[in-house]
Image (tube, rainbow, N blue to C red):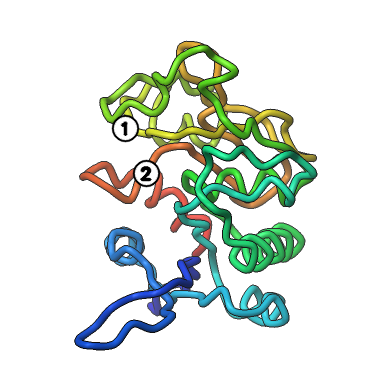
Amino acid sequence: MSRPLIGITAYYEAARWGDWVREAVLSPPSYAKAVLRAGGAPVVLPPVSSYAVEDYVRGLSGLVLTGGVEVGADAYNGEQDARVPEPQPNRDRFELALARAAVRADVPVLAIARGMHVLNVAQGGSLIPWLPDSLDSDRHAAPGAHTIQVSVTSRLGKAVGDRVEVVAPHHQSVRRLGTGLLAVAWAEDQIVEGVELQGHRFGVGVQWHPERGGDTRLFDAFMEAAR
């Protein structure tokens, strides 16, 4: 049986090889390896133009929206915080269009870290641009593990259980949920760390990085939907 074709979003920025420094399409190998382990065939999608997103979606069995630089505030009519790294508008436009096309086509989506924010903004939601100001604490940027509470009735909960320990340093978070999205996982302070798209074959976003480490359950559930 052939493997489901899974699109993986990527960076588009300067890279060095040999004596050359050129713009390149980059993707950490952990995403492709996680897709392969779960039984899929990974395909990296270069964020160079939004014109091809419908064609991509027609050819894909699933989509992974990956991590990276925070979504620019312009994408949700917010105000860019000077402490947030410079946004990548081309990547934002490409991934927002790709996410919307995948939702319309009922293509399974696994949205990771920045990817969860992309999915939320694509559905009309907004973000907290600098989370430490909202909490008077930088604890969500800490590198250590913390425990997440997960709704047991959600797809996410059925895949990973009602509690999961994750490492998920981040400076932004979901503020207003996008249309059709439900919060299904929370940190102890009730910051949203997981979302799901109602009525969709598989539309799950998580703040952490399930492609890292040995816990394959979420990728396995995603791949089951992609088949």
Q: Residue furthest front?
A: 82
Q: Residue at x 65, y 68 (%)?
A: 94
In screen coordinates, is 34 left or right of 171? Answer: left
Closer-to-camera residue (140/151): 140
Q: Is residue 18 left or right of residue 46?
A: left
Spatial CA span between label 1 and label 2: 8 Å
User: Residue at the location (24% across, 83% down)?
Assistant: 17
Residue found at x 59% / y 65%: 91
Q: Is residue 151 above or below residue 173?
A: above
174 versus 211 height, above or below: above
Q: Which residue shows up at 63% across the image and 68% down it?
A: 90
Q: Are marks 1 and 2 in contact (CB under 8 Å)?
A: yes
Which is nearer the N-term, disc 1 or disc 2? 1
Q: Could you tell whether 190 is left or right of 75 in the image?
A: left
Q: Residues within 10 Å of mark 1 (few under 14, many from 20)?
A: some
Residue 75 vertical placement versus 83 (above, below): below
- Image quadrant in which the N terminus is located: bottom left
Label 2 Cα neighbours within 10 Å, binned few <14 / some 14-19 / many ≥20: some
Q: What x and y, as percent, mark residue 175?
A: 68, 28
Residue 92: % across, % down: 63, 60
Which residue is labeled 2 in the image? 209
Near-viewer residue (138 or 60): 138
184 above or below 90? above
Q: Give coordinates of residue 213: x percent, y percent.
A: 22, 44
- Depth check: give the residue in front, 134 or 59: 134
Kind of residue at disc 2: His
Q: The residue under label 1 is which amino acid type?
A: Val
Q: Position of residue 89 (x, y in %)?
A: 64, 62
Circle 2: element type: loop
Tag 1, which secondary structure? loop
Numbered circle sitting on residue 167: 1
Q: Which mark is residue 82?
A: none
